[in-house]
Image (tube, rainbow, N blue to C red):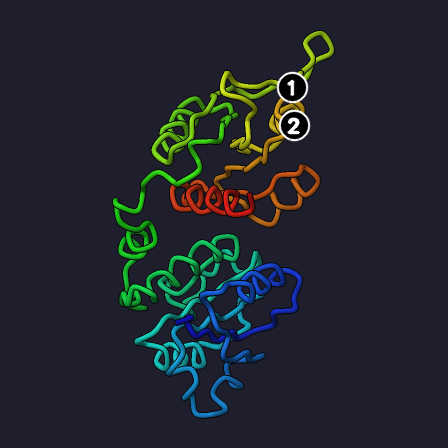
Amino acid sequence: MPASLIIIGNTRRREFLHFALWLCAQPTVKIVGEFASIEDAFADEGLLLADADMTIVLQSWSDQYSKTLADRLIGQTLFHRLICCYGAWCESDGRNRDIWPDAVRVSLRLAQSVVEREILRIADDEPAIPPTSARDEIFSYRLGELGDWKPISGLQDLNGAIVGADKVLRKTLSMLLSDLGMRSLSLPLLKDEIRRPVRPKETSRGPVHVVLHDLDPWGYNVQASVTAARKMFPAAEILGIATMPDAGLTSEIADEQIRVVIPKLDLENGLRWHLGQLLQRG
């Protein structure tokens, strides 16, 4: 039975459009209500909210919703799942606002993987995380169980490449990919020079399908390396890895043909989810 979902906010805003379309395409979700504001969602005294498996609030700016309304919504959905999906302009709210508890706040760039995991938990009849949870509890909850970190079927047929200046990070990524079933190359930042031009390269097992490229610190050398990686591995999807994939970095890499940027603080969960998505797209 599909999980029932309520959406509050403007799904037609450009920043949320892709996420909203993704939600509509999920066969395991049934959208039972869509409201422009929290007040509209309480038009029936909150009966629909009380019955829905999950409620997602889309937040575009810091004071878009008052604490009074947020508290009312939290109380109405206390025994179900509530997610406040916030955009780039709300990144600092966790430090200077207390409208939404940390347990319900999810950055838009992480929203798909977090929501998909919650849908699976609903299907397994697992309880939602309480809104009063501490940050270490939230981190542990979203990271999942040790048993979840297992090889992904089909990934063993793909080859990867890890590119970046940080040797320790490359080693960590190589171990994570190996745990998921993918073998990979490890390379420092690439240079495409006149005397030593970059040429297409394959592994002994065939072409590289996925490139994980460290984007920190973004600048000329990293940008040149991303360009060289596209030339060296023309058939590969490039996934970026960054400490803070904020609006500034997003605008800087807009023309770089990087499919997605995975935050380093969400490395395990994000890497597993996005590789799974690549396999599903074939």
Label 2 SS: loop
Q: Is residue 103 left or right of residue 189?
A: left
Q: Is residue 128 left or right of residue 182?
A: left
Label 1 SS: loop
Kindly identify which residue carries mark 1: 200
Query: Residue sitting at 63 percent across and 63 percent down?
Result: 17
Residue 79 at x, y = what percent? 30, 76
Frontmost residue, 219 versus 172: 172
**Number of other residues with Cα within 10 Å of mark 2, as a class: few under 14, some 14 to 19, many 20 or more:** some
Q: Is residue 51 left or right of residue 262?
A: left
Quadrant of the drawing holding the C terminus = top right
Identify residue type, mark 2.
Pro
Q: Is residue 133 visible?
A: yes
Identify residue type, mark 1.
Pro
Depicted 189 relative to depicted 145: above or below: above
Q: Is residue 226 left or right of residue 81?
A: right
Whichever of callouts 1 and 2 sits on the residue coming sooner in the sequence is 1
Pointers 1 and 2 in contact (CB under 8 A)? Answer: yes
Frontmost residue, 191 versus 203: 203
Q: Is residue 132 visible?
A: no
Please tell me in which quadrant of the rendered image residue 37 appears: bottom right
Residue 234 is tagged as 2
Frontmost residue, 165 versus 110: 110
Residue 3 at x, y = what percent? 41, 71
Query: Residue sitting at 44 percent across and 40 percent down?
Result: 264
Quadrant of the drawing holding the N terminus = bottom left
List the single residue furthest toward the top: 195
**Number of other residues with Cα within 10 Å of mark 1, as a class: few under 14, some 14 to 19, many 20 or more:** few
Frontmost residue, 30 versus 231: 30
Depicted 34 relative to depicted 218: above or below: below
Query: Residue sitting at 51 percent across and 80 percent down?
Result: 33
